[in-house]
Amino acid sequence: MRVSAIQMDMKLGEPEYNFAHAVELVRRAAATGADVITLPETWNVGFFPSENLEALSDREGERVKATFGPLAKELGVNIVAGSVSNVRDGKIYNTSYTFNRQGEVVADYDKTHLFTPMGEHHSFEFGDRLVTFELDGVRCGIVICYDIRFLELVRSLALRGIDLLFVVAQWPKLRTRHWELLNTARAIENQMFVVATNSCGTAGQTKYAGHSILLDPWGEVLVLGGEGEQILTADLDLEVVRGIRESINVYRDRRPALYEIK
């Protein structure tokens, strides 16, 4: 499976520009022969406008679906469309949508861990469910930015049988080392591929890290981005997962009766 991660530099509070730019970048990524193309977190508005957020947000994912469903079908690719600021039932969610090659929505996920240090929980609602899905027969999961710090969440997805985790983020440059280490740890401890797509550029006072990273289940780096906008592409050999889990079977050797995680 060939995956392209779009390390996008979006404009804060400018969805018209951001939608057009995202489509342009997806088309460029498709030219690499990618099977799956990913975008970062809240690329429609940036992370995140303190004023007029609701007015700037998508509605029930209508614009994302109208844009990327037909685009996925036209290009014949799967698109993990990052996440968008999205109004549903009068509340704002940080929502990810994933489209298969036929342009169908195969997953939608609301960010479950909101980044309280930046007040995300004052503007967005918490998601309340985990999501897994299949792309080209590969079992996948998705988390959004701050979610990656919560190992219980990712292990719960792993126990549901995923071999590939997508992480979409607006991770700050200040904590670049955490970004690389946390994604690497999740890959190693769960013996799965991790495709972590971050944003870049500056929004308000925050400089975002870039450094999108694609990792194999050994934690080896397949490709690592720099700080600027770019498209990173790698081929994932999903058969590697089987071999690793047979040689070091941490799932068999778990002792959940002893774990007290509440």
Image: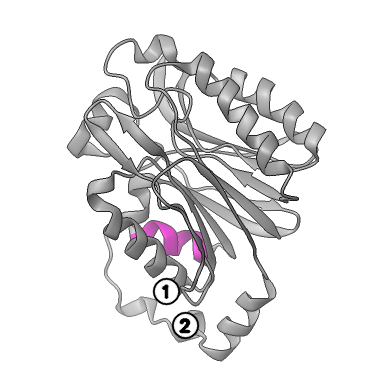
Task: Check the image and report above or below for 228 versus 35.
Answer: above
**In the image, farthest residue toward the bottom:** 247
Name the kind of residue labelled 1 in the image: Glu
Alpha-carbon span between mark 2 and mark 1: 8 Å
Closer-to-camera residue (135/153): 135
Of 84 and 253, nearer the camera is: 84
- Residue 56 image position (x, y, % from top left): 43, 13
Q: Is residue 244 left or right of residue 73?
A: left
Residue 152 disc label: none
Number of marks in the rendered image: 2
Residue 51 horizontal side relative to residue 60, left or right: left
Write the start and end of the magenta stretch as one range: 151-159
Say whether residue 21 is magenta. Answer: no
- Mark nearer the N terminus (2 vs 1): 1
Please identify the quadrant where the C terminus is shown: bottom left
Q: Secondary structure at mark 2?
A: helix
Amino acid identity at mark 2: Val
* Residue marked by disc 2: 250
Q: Are marks 2 and 1 in contact (CB under 8 Å)?
A: yes
In the image, residue 71 sits, relative to residue 60, either above or below, namely below
| Residue that numbered label 1 is attached to | 189
Callout 1: SS: helix
Q: Counting other residues with Cα less than 10 Å from the Cα at mark 2, is it few (<14), some (14-19), or many (20 or more)? A: some
Residue 162 visible in this rendered orientation of the protein: no
Residue drawn at (32%, 20%) of the image: 49
* Image coords of residue 23 (percent x, y): 63, 28
Side of 113 relative to 3 (left or right): left
